[in-house]
Image: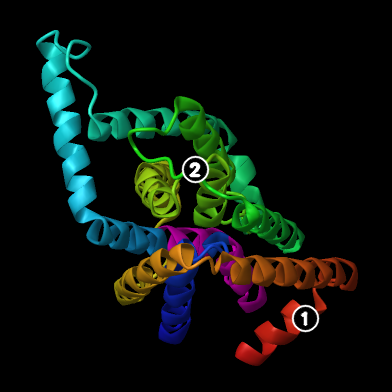
Amino acid sequence: MSVWQAILQGMIQGLTEFLPVSSSGHLSIFQYFTGLSGEEGAFFSIVLHLGTLVAVVIAFFPTIFGLVQEGLAMLGDLFRGQLFRKRVTPRRRMVLLLILSLVPLVAVVFLKDWYESFSTDNGIVVEGLCLILTGILLTLANRCPTDGKNAATMTPADALAIGITQALAPLPGLSRSGSTISVGMLMGLGKKFAVTFSFIMGIPAVLGAVVLEIPGVIENGFGLPAHILIIGFVTSLLFGLLAIALVNRLVVSDKFRFFAWYTLIAGGVVTVLGLFELFSGHLLQQMIVGMLG
């Protein structure tokens, strides 16, 4: 993998992880047409996800720090037998709802190989279909008026619905941010709160995915030089911060419809290309890899 390929993938990851267009789908498509799919591409994707994880922590640090403080206070109350005696504040309620939203991720542990099979296979049809699904969710959310729910009024059913959506998001082409924010808005969450809840909820999911990949990395080796990994990490972090700021502005200004159009069109094009590649013996892939080589 060259330096420019590492930078380009870092840019794709940083922008598409938070913009509702699917980072995994775009990375998978890029890796397919450049011949970088497989174990090496899968490991580099993990490094890029770590970069965007750090971007979330930086962007939402005050909120995350407050939630961590509240979580530690809850542990203290639990050991003192006072957990259920204190009034549930909005911050404590958000901690509990975030925990509930993570329950569906248990299923991902058992379906890990199934999810990865779509990212590492030599095809892009699934990516195209999932991009179309992302576009449908964004369209529905953009047309649905929200009730303005926040940490004080959000229900356990809301958290569980968003959590189930996140558990499906490892499918390449199904935007994690786009789908979870859309479902949050469909459940009545306020727009800015839906963004905050979605991004913070994604932190344990990314960490969990990294932990699950550690045995495979140890077994297969890193396969990439350190400077390539560092370049990809830093690039995804910087462009991730840019994308987070952009999403916050776009959600409030009702511009999600542009991403709905983009993912619907892109999904249709990718699906057609994927079918062409399938029946032509990967003709375009071979031509592009040949030109890059």
Return the x and y of residue 291 as percentages of the image width and height. Answer: 66, 91
> Which residue is more in the foreground, 48 or 196?
196
Asked if the magenta segment contains residue 31, the reply would be yes
- Position of 38 relative to 117 (above/below): below
Q: Is residue 264 left or right of residue 62?
A: right
**In this orientation, does residue 293 appear?**
no
- First-in-chain label (2 vs 1): 2
**Residue picked out by circle 1:** 284
Q: What's the magenta bit mostly, secondary-structure-wise?
A: helix
**Residue picked out by circle 2:** 147
Q: Which residues are magenta?
A: 25-46
Q: Is residue 183 left or right of residue 78?
A: right
Q: What residue is rendered at 77% in x and 61% in y?
A: 125
**Amino acid tagged 1:** Leu
Return the x and y of residue 250 as percentages of the image width and height. Answer: 47, 68
Return the x and y of residue 20 as percentages of the image width and height. Answer: 54, 62
Q: CA distance from mark 2 to mark 1?
A: 47 Å
Q: What residue is rendered at 79% in x and 66% in y?
A: 271
Depth check, mark 2 against mark 1: the one in front is: 2
> Which residue is more in the foreground, 212 or 138?
138
Dot label at residue 143:
none
- Position of 135 relative to 77 (above/below): below
Asked if the magenta segment contains residue 148, the reply would be no
The image quarter containing residue 175 is bottom right
Q: What residue is rendered at 55% in x and 39% in y?
A: 187
**In this orientation, does residue 129 appear?**
yes
| Residue at disc 1, secondary structure | helix
Badge 2 crowding class, 10 Å Cα cut-off, few under 14, some 14 to 19, many 20 or more, is some
**Amino acid tagged 2:** Asp
